[in-house]
Image (cartoon, grey):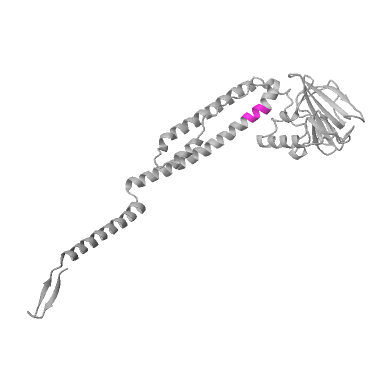
Amino acid sequence: MNRYQFNEEKLEFTRVRPNIKTILKRILWVFLGSVVLALVYYLIFGMFILSPAERNLVRETQLMQTEYERLTNEMNTLNKVVEELEMRDRSIYGTVLHSTPLEVTREADISHYRKLLEDPSFALAYHADSVFGGLEHRAALVTRALYMAGNEVYGMLDSLKYLPAAFPLRNPPPESMGATTGRRIHPFYKIPMEHTGMDFLAGLGTDVLATADGQVVNVSRSARGRGNVVEIAHPYRGYTTLYAHLSDIFVRKGQFVTRGMVIARVGSTGMSFMPHLHYEIRQEDRIADPVHYFFMDVMPGEYRQIMLTAYNTGQSLD
């Protein structure tokens, strides 16, 4: 903008021409203003307003992170399924059915993908296929293992009716299950003694059920020791079951019984601390832990609770 100054001698306005210093100062101010404007533009448009390419990258990153979380959830679910299968196989099928343990290789570990989320230059889409592949492979292994186990059990179906794989009481609650096999505090002697079966708390007169098909090989009545007893032999791998401290007995020696048949009622005969059923399983005269033989009547979560109760009960009832 031009500046003018009034000339008193000529009585007119004359144009004031800036000197070099003024011109340099103006140039400096223009330069500094341009730098400030450029900085403001960068802050506004460079940091807060994304370009189309940056928006696409952010959207893809969010999609990949969502996919990663979904894959993680699926993997955790699959891990739980496999762990339940392995637990059942180790504690039940391997012990009871003497089947070959399921072998499921854990090859799909995606924990190392988490660090990719911390890398701004990662390409998670490239690795997603690997995660999917691991999941599919793991699922295929589980399916194959289940198929093989199913075929093995299917071939044994005719013999399974002789396997003592049910509760000796009708729908007993988990809290009614007492000490299982092992050293337990004797209720009368108050010292650790070997307990050869599992105790079930129940009211007097509760129905006692045969846990598998078989033939009654012993019926005895006594006011001492195990009290009134029924023993059943099952024609499968040398299994026998014993039911003690009974009140009424409804079977006789030599009689054939079927799983679920009422054979007696709960009592407190013999050396019994309170009304309950003492239940034993033996295989070839070796004591077997009944806890591992209830898989026909319980789900995995219930089975775990039964195990905790049975193993953490320190005193037996007989």
Give the x, y percent position of residue 94. Answer: 67, 24
Asked if residue 89 is among those painted magenta in the image, a careful observer would answer yes
Q: Nearer the viewer, residue 90 or 30?
A: 30
Locate residue 192 relative to residue 38 in the image: left or right: right
Report the quarter where the C terminus lies. top right
Give the x, y percent position of residue 45. Answer: 32, 54
Quarter of image, res 43: bottom left
Give the x, y percent position of residue 119. Answer: 42, 41
* Rendered residue at 68%/27% (across/down): 92
Report the quarter where the N terminus lies. bottom left
Quarter of image, res 59: top left
Q: Residue furthest right?
A: 223
Give the main secondary structure of the magenta stretch: helix
Q: Nearer the viewer, residue 279 or 66?
A: 66
Question: With respect to residue 233, does 186 lie above or below?
Answer: below
Q: How many marks?
A: 0
Asked if residue 190 is among those painted magenta in the image, a careful observer would answer no
Give the x, y percent position of residue 189. Answer: 88, 34
Q: Nearer the viewer, residue 93 or 215?
A: 93
Locate residue 259 relative to residue 23 in the image: left or right: right
Question: With respect to residue 93, does 57 lie above or below?
Answer: below
* Rendered residue at 72%/36% (across/down): 308
Locate residue 175 relative to residue 51 in the image: left or right: right
**Segment tinted magenta in the rendering:** 86-91
